[in-house]
Amino acid sequence: MYSSTPETVDNGTLVKDNLCFCDKREGCVASGVWDLRSCKENVPVFTSLPHLYLADPTYHQDINGMRPDPEKHKISIELEPVRFLC
């Protein structure tokens, strides 16, 4: 099973390999969101876990009503290998 961790939404502070996801012109945004500008013609699109769960505290200071709760907002995925027979 895979679950969301601080490394999942890291901007390169914890996992240096994540620095490659920073926008080359704008630099890195605070950890907690994925910067998708480079994916589609520099359109300013960012995404996060629900209620900015695991995000840098600065996001919570700037947006009212965010109350991240691990029980409600963490994301988990369980992969089961399936072998297909032909």
Image (tube, rainbow, N blue to C red):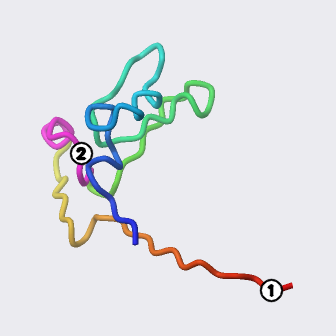
Of the residues under marks 1 and 2, which one precedes in the sequence? Answer: 2
Q: Residue at 26% of width from left, 37% of height from top?
A: 14
Q: Residue at 40% of width from left, 72% of height from top?
A: 1
Can you identify the residue that label 2 sits on?
Answer: 55
Location of residue 64 in the rendering, given as x and y in whole percent from the top left corner: 16, 46
Above or below for 81 versus 46: below
Above or below for 37 versus 6: above
Q: Is residue 57 left or right of residue 8?
A: left
Could you tell me how far apart the alpha carbons at marks 1 and 2 are, in whole angstroms?
Answer: 43 Å
* Magenta-tinted stretch: 52-62
Above or below for 13 versus 52: above
Q: Which mark is residue 65?
A: none
Rendering quarter of residue 83: bottom right
Question: In the image, what residue type sits under mark 2?
Answer: Ala
Can you identify the residue that label 1 sits on?
Answer: 85
**Depth check: 17 or 46 in front?**
17
What residue occupies the far bottom of the structure in this picture? Answer: 85
Rendering quarter of residue 46: top left
